[in-house]
Image (cartoon, rainbow, N blue to C red):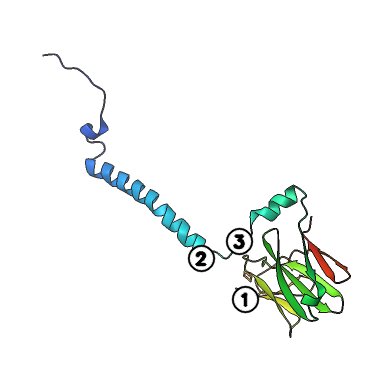
Amino acid sequence: MKQIKTGTNPLKEGKISRRSFLSSIVTVWGAILTLPFIYGIVDYLSPPGKKFTSFRNKLQNKVEVTSIPLSELPENSSKFIKIDDEPVLVIRKDGMNIIAFSAICTHLDCLVGYRKNEKDIICNCHGSTFNLDGMPQEGPAKEPLSKYNLTIEGDKITISNPI
Ligand code: FES
C-alpha cells in the first residue's frame, strides 16, 4: 500500500491543540465584538469636542460671520452665539468694551462661561479660570482661549472666526 503525503497539519500533529485553537478564535471574536461598546463608553464619557468644521474653514481661509444687536448685550453680561458650528462667548465688559472668545475650554473641551461678579471666565468641568484677555489663571487649562474678531457698527456687533 502506497502512502500519499498531504502536507503538514499542525492540528493533527498536535502542535496546536484544538482547545487552544478554539480559545484563540473566541478571544479574537470577543475582542471584535467588544470594540463598539468600548467606543460607545469612551464617546459618552468624553466632553463635547470641537468640531472639525472650524479647522476645515481655517484651512480654506473661509470667514464665517455672525451679527447680534448691541441691545441684546447689556453691560457686564455675556451671550453665547455659534459661528461655524462652534460656540462663541461674547462678553460686554462695559461701554463698548466687547470681546469674543471660543467658548470651548482649552483643557478638555467643556463649555466655559462668564462670571459677572468675578469678571472672569470659568470652566465648570475642572475649575479652570481665564481672565478677560482669555489667558488661563487657575486650574488645569494651560492654553489661552481663541479670540474671535469683532467689530461694532452702530447697533450691530459683528463677530467672525479668527483666520
Ligand atoms: S475642560 Fe475645562 S477645566 Fe477641564
| Residue at x 60% of width, y 61% of height | 49
Q: Measure the C-alpha gap from mark 2 to mark 3.
A: 11 Å
Tell me the tag on residue 78.
none
Badge 2: residue crowd in 10 Å (few <14, some 14–19, many ≥20) = few
| Residue at x 31% of width, y 44% of height | 25
Tell me the tag on residue 45.
2
Cβ at disc 1 under 8 Å from ligand 1: yes
Q: Quadrant of residue 14?
A: top left
Q: How many marks?
A: 3
Quarter of the figure that contains the C terminus: bottom right
* Label 3 sits on residue: 49
Residue 105 placement (x, y as % from top left): 67, 67
| Residue type beneath disc 1 | Asn
* Label 1 sits on residue: 124
Task: Answer with the quadrant where ligand 1 appears in the image.
Answer: bottom right
Residues under numbered marks 2 and 3 in contact, where contact means CB atoms less than 8 Å apart: no
Q: Secondary structure at mark 1?
A: loop
